[in-house]
Amino acid sequence: RKEVEQDPGPFNVPEGATVAFNCTYSNSASQSFFWYRQDCRKEPKLLMSVYSSGNEDGRFTAQLNRASQYISLLIRDSKLSDSATYLCVVNMWGRGSTLGRLYFGRGTQLTVWP
Amino acid sequence: NAGVTQTPKFQVLKTGQSMTLQCAQDMNHEYMSWYRQDPGMGLRLIHYSVGAGITDQGEVPNGYNVSRSTTEDFPLRLLSAAPSQTSVYFCASSLDSPTSTNEKLFFGSGTQLSVL
């Protein structure tokens, strides 16, 4: 099982739609969770961190479910500019390592059409 | 601030050649890392550094070397290029360990490497 699993999509939605992505992770001891956004042929950029209580940033809402080991990203009122690949990122501790590492999911591709 | 600067943007190598991908940041970040991104795969950590003189292996270190002689620079060396190393490479840095909840990774713009 991969450390971080995401539905690759693609998700094709009209402007104004609400879309949700899920991501599951394998290590129950993981402590930090993030969503990054990557535009085509560009570098990833942090979209938001995910907190235990859930958090919201404008149209974006992130949730964490530790019991089921998944995180989610909800995008409301989708814009054309939201078209991108969304990467789920989780920290895990490697064997013998005192420094956690970030593991990236394969990404979920979103296309918002007019 | 230029942020994270990676060079070159594109490179074509023949099997067996060696080369160095350059990465520099001007944000005084302690943590620097190299990832590779392949189609259908997530970014995979190659090597990372938590400060000058300190490096460690990531998930896929074979065939790559790194060193960190200064805080600003973290070059990635391909010792003997192989077709399996064809990929997009990203350098990234953060002020502290990126596993902290509030720590943001800053990425360079990437290097598209093809090994023939």
Image (cartoon, coloured by chain):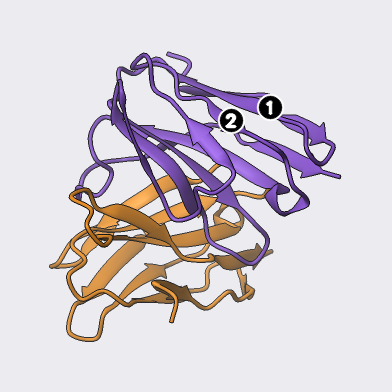
Chain colours: A orange, B purple
Residue placed at 41% from the left, 71% from the top? Answer: A4
Judged left or right of residue B56, residue B86 is right
Q: Quadrant of the N terminus of chain A?
A: bottom left
Q: Amino acid at mark 2?
A: Arg
Against B109, residue B73 (above or below) is above
Judged left or right of residue B11, residue A67 is left
Q: Which residue is mark 2?
A: B77
Which picture quadrant has residue B1?
top left
Query: Which of these two is toward me, B87 or A35?
Result: B87
The x, y position of residue B15, in whole percent, is 81, 41
Q: Secondary structure at mark 2?
A: strand
The chain that hosts pointer 2 is B
The chain that hosts pointer 1 is B
Comes first in the chain, label 2 or label 1:
1
Q: In this rendering, does residue A109 appear at all?
A: yes
The x, y position of residue B101, in whole percent, is 20, 50
